[in-house]
Image (cartoon, rainbow, N blue to C red):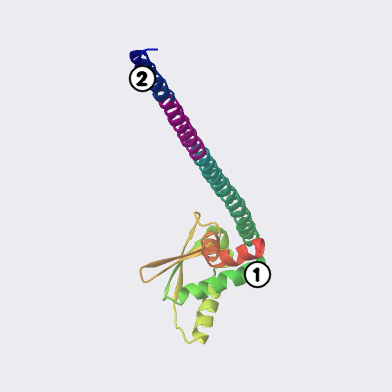
Amino acid sequence: MSGIEKITERILADAREQAEANRAEAAGKAKEILAAGDALAEKKRQAILDQAKAEEIELHKRRQAVCDLEMRKDTLQAKREVMDAVFREAGEALAKISGPEYETLLEKLLIECATVGSGKVAIAKKDQTFFKPAFVKKAEKALEERGIKRRIEIDRADEAIENGFIYYADGMEINCTFAAVLAQERERLETGVYSILFA
């Protein structure tokens, strides 16, 4: 083999060796790039799964909150209906009072109203049998015994008043119809009644 052939052979061998080294290096880099890509893809997949899980938890919490709110509203509505029924029954029982008990109730209401000042009374038409001068005098006397001097007049019988009366004194109008008294008492008693019913 001549000297030129040896040199040529040597150059080709070096080139083959360099090409093999380059191929090996490229394969190694490709492997690293693929591994990094797989790791990044796994990281993104995990992030998507975590976000989906967090969104699912949040959605469940929101749905639960809506369900809880609806349940509270329904419970509150049911309790309100029970309270309404209790006070409606109280109103019906109050409307059924008659005789001396009814007269005593009217007298107590009249005495309480008249403490604000002398005045006139518009009464329910059906209560004319109770509201006689003697009845009014009895209320005035009870007030006098408390050291309160008042003059009470019967103004008129009013068909619009179902039971009880309206007291007019010093520009004030005090509604002592049973419906108004019960509504006022409801405001005062509602908390106590609620705690008894739903303790």
What secondary structure is the magenta-colored segment mainly?
Answer: helix
For residue 101, the mark is: 1
For residue 10, the mark is: none
What is the span of residues highlighted in magenta in the rendered image? Answer: 21-47
Residue lying at 55% horizontally and 75% vertically, measured from the top left: 134
Task: Give the crowd class for mark 1: few <14, some 14-19, many >=20 residues within 10 Å.
Answer: few
Task: Tell me which corner region of the image, top left, top right, bottom left or bottom right, holds residue 19.
Answer: top left
- The kind of residue on which mark 2 rests is Ile
Give above or below for 96 relative to 38.
below
Give above or below for 23 relative to 115.
above
What distance separates the C-alpha of mark 2 from that of mark 1?
Answer: 132 Å
Residue lying at 48% horizontally and 38% vertically, measured from the top left: 43
Asked if the stretch drawn in magenta spans residue 29, the answer is yes
- The kind of residue on which mark 1 rests is Glu
Look at mark 2 in the image and give the residue it sits on: 11
Asked if the stretch drawn in magenta spans residue 148, the answer is no
- The percent position of residue 127, horizontal first and vertical second, equals 56, 62
**Which of these two is toward me, 3 or 21?**
3
Q: Quadrant of the C terminus?
A: bottom right
Q: Residue furthest front?
A: 2
Earlier in the chain: of badge 2 and badge 1, it is 2
Q: Is residue 97 visible?
A: no
